[in-house]
Amino acid sequence: QKEVEQNSGPLSVPEGAIASLNCTYSDRGSQSFFWYRQYSGKSPELIMSIYSNGDKEDGRFTAQLNKASQYVSLLIRDSQPSDSATYLCAPGGSGGGADGLTFGKGTHLIIQP
Amino acid sequence: GAVVSQHPSWVICKSGTSVKIECRSLDFQATTMFWYRQFPKQSLMLMATSNEGSKATYEQGVEKDKFLINHASLTLSTLTVTSAHPEDSSFYICSAPTGGSSYNEQFFGPGTRLTVL
């Protein structure tokens, strides 16, 4: 049984600051990792994917992966009120056929103006 | 990113009726699609994997006779909730990977909100 752990929050961050979101996972075979953003009442939107240990940057977002520690994080720089949402972490499969995703409970992020 | 559509976006039905939800990949072909369900204040839970040309596979605890899945083409999967009851009221969301590997990113449809009276 795959498990994904996230701090459900709410995580409150002042506008302009860095928001740091964390996720741990149980499946050591996971080779891909995805961060989704979900606004209330909407479906998840893919914002970052990462496959290799280390950092991956895309605009204000940086994903960090440490497979040895089974840990993945998402940093949001210069946080904006529009970043307020629930952020879902989802490890992918082992690289074979496409697998359905197991999500964490999500971290509710609130950016305070 | 790739575009996935769902129809309808919301539906209200009476208890005992059946409801069909469509999921389409608009700009790519998807031999596999996934169906999720999300209850209020909970995360998404995978219900089933829809496979083009073969039977769907269901997660443990999901009744295959109640949630009928048909993957009619490389761009269309349908989920039919049969004999719906109020406890089936939920947010149903489909996703599709852009390739056949788990390395491929998965994109979600906008979801269908089902309310059973």
Image (cartoon, coloured by chain):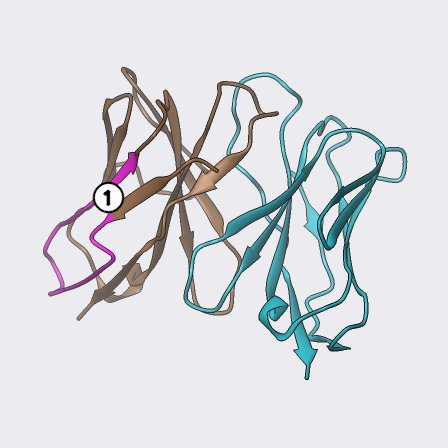
Question: Overall secondary structure of the magenta stretch?
Answer: strand
Chain A takes which shade in the image? cyan
Magenta segment: does it hold A82?
no
The residue shown at (69%, 75%) is A10
- Dividing the picture into quadrants, the one containing residue A16 is bottom right
Coordinates of residue A2 in the picture (x, y in percent)? 65, 39
Q: In which quarter of the image is the N terminus of chain A?
A: top right
The residue shown at (24%, 43%) is B66
Coordinates of residue B40 in the picture (x, y in percent)? 44, 68
In the image, residue A40 sits, relative to residue B47, either above or below, namely: below
Q: Is mark 1 on a helix, strand or loop?
A: loop
Q: Nearer the viewer, residue B18 or B5?
A: B5
Chain B takes which shade in the image? brown
In the image, residue A24 sits, relative to residue B74, either above or below, namely: below
The residue shown at (78%, 30%) is A28
Residue on which the image places disc 1: B66
Coordinates of residue B106 in the picture (x, y in percent)? 50, 35
What count of labels does the image hold?
Answer: 1
User: Does residue A105 appear anywhere in the picture?
Assistant: no
Coordinates of residue A52 in the picture (x, y in percent)? 79, 29
| Residue extent of the magenta highlight | B7-25
Chain identity of mark 1: B
Q: Which of B32 and B56 is in front in this view?
A: B32
